[in-house]
Image: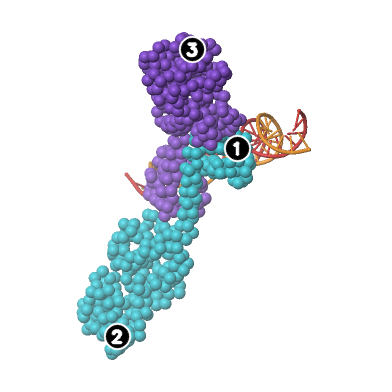
Chain colours: A cyan, B purple, C red, D orange
Amino acid sequence: MQFQQLLYFVAVAETRHFTRAAERVHVSQPSLSQQIKALEQELGAELFSRARGNITLTDAGEALLPLARRILADTETARLEVQELAQLRRGRVRLGATPSLCTGLLPDVLRVFHDLHPGIELLIEESGSHDLVRELARGALDLALVVLPLPTPSPALTTVELLREDLVVVSAASEPAPRRPVRITDLRDQPLVMFRHGYDLRELTVAACRAEGFEPSFTVEGGELDAVLGFVRAGLGLAVVPAMVAARAGRDLRVTALARPGLRRTIALAHRSDVAPPRAARELQRVLLASRKVRPGGTSV
Amino acid sequence: MQFQQLLYFVAVAETRHFTRAAERVHVSQPSLSQQIKALEQELGAELFSRARGNITLTDAGEALLPLARRILADTETARLEVQELAQLRRGRVRLGATPSLCTGLLPDVLRVFHDLHPGIELLIEESGSHDLVRELARGALDLALVVLPLPTPSPALTTVELLREDLVVVSAASEPAPRRPVRITDLRDQPLVMFRHGYDLRELTVAACRAEGFEPSFTVEGGELDAVLGFVRAGLGLAVVPAMVAARAGRDLRVTALARPGLRRTIALAHRSDVAPPRAARELQRVLLASRKVRPGGTSV
DNA sequence: CGATACGCATAGGTAAAGCCTATCGAGATC
DNA sequence: GATCTCGATAGGCTTTACCTATGCGTATCG
């Protein structure tokens, strides 16, 4: 049984005329006759009663017609569905990202991506790098924006460096300005506002202080990114945040660079090594990589 | 898109392995690879992510799989349905017959037919020849047993003579036996029990009497066949019925042949000339024609 | 009543498609 | 690093789907 044979069959059933059916499917009449005959032979039953000028479906033909129509319709649906996916008119990307990236980097990029491919659904999971890596490996995410180095490196994941991002110190505009540029050691006696456990920024900042030989002290700790900025704004202390986050924090926050060598973190795109990400995820990856050329506050890798 | 390509595709999707899929569909591995590739090219999307030893469906493949399965299932269904019809394991015959034939001829033949083809549904319409012819032309019947000559002959109907059936006189066993064999003229002064209008037997009997120059008189008229036999049994009069009906009427009815040349009627099978009857109807026709060889009370044509 | 037109089936030739065996090449395994 | 596995590629052959030309039965028309 062949799709064409079913197509020819439906054409004859609908026109009740071999010659006109042949025209309709753009084939010569003998070809159509032959295919119908082949189909009849394969099925072991006549499909049409060929009375001169009055072609009719036999009972076998009646039985076949609805199924043939459905098969052809399904075929068309399959073709369209696959092509919609391929042409990014439809689809889904499950993207993981750390909270600071969701705030800093993602909004503009996702806006660009969505304008390019309005049919693609964007599912964002906001978590620490550790969780993101696990979700990637589980197949629950297609792509993740993580901070390098990965907490649990694995050959099962491929990472592509996206950009290096400077960290800066933010403080309340109402408070006295810190000496600039701020050195890490200046933070020894400064009260800090610190993110909850799980934030890469927390680990990074604490590690930097310890490298200078002191343990940072926190006035408040445990909040999410926005809460931390709020606490800083209220004068509860300083915080170390990515430049990109600080850039959009508003006028009532003072942004102070760190003295050289400063702190920076490396943002990378990660995906499973064993399977190619879906078409839409590859496209998002492309858009992300393209966007770094015009990103403020970060350094292209 | 080809059925085989979908079949190959599903095989690879299920085995996650090109070589094993090729074995499963009984084709060489390169052929299968080529067909998958052709399918991917036609659809414009990769269907599998070919990581060594870990073949996975892409999102396009995921989208295609359920449709491919459904298409293949429908194909199988179509094949089975048509073959069941062709092999008479399923189907329907809409058979029309006159009341006397329903009583006399049909039960045994239908029993034989049903034993041969238990899956075929039998729909019987019991009417006079006139109505049967109309229903045939309407396409509401596949086949009809009618009495020749047809009340409304038409080139649109094809008739095949089935058998000639003798008519006999029945009377109550409790009443004095009529002189035998009965001549038509003997009925002149005999009270008859007569069927309702529409029965071919009525027209036939009345016509025979008129040919002999008299109008028959009825003690009761208007009943169906069984009612008429009941009236005869009760001694209300004689009736002229087909030998086949009389043969199964029971002991309390006396059956008397008519004197030569007697009366007989011709039973024929009729169907539309323009369309071939369904397979099951042709088979019933065959069984009917075969049955006349062993029919009692009738003469093979 | 013969000629014509219509419409499906058949015949024969051609081009494409599908399948095969043999081989390649890349990644995994020991 | 040799071997193995497994999918991709190459080249040749067979099948098949298509075409044009023609046949044949039936309805129509002068």
Under tag 2, what secondary structure? Answer: strand
Question: Considering the image in quadrants, where does the C terminus of chain B appear?
Answer: top right
Q: Quadrant of residue A95?
A: bottom left
Disc 3, disc 1: CB below 8 Å? no
Gap in Å between the C-alphas at discs 2 and 3?
129 Å
Decide: is A29 above or below B248: below
Residue lying at 43% horizontally and 64% vertically, measured from the top left = A284
The amino acid pointed to by label 3 is Val
Residue on which disc 1 sits: A54
* Label 1 Cα neighbours within 10 Å, binned few <14 / some 14-19 / many ≥20: few
Label number found at residue B182: 3
Gap in Å between the C-alphas at discs 2 and 1?
90 Å
Q: Nearer the viewer, mark 2 or mark 3?
A: 3
- Chain letter for mark 2, please: A
Observer-nearest of B248 and B168: B168
Label number found at residue A172: 2
Can residue A260 be seen at all in this image of the molecule?
no
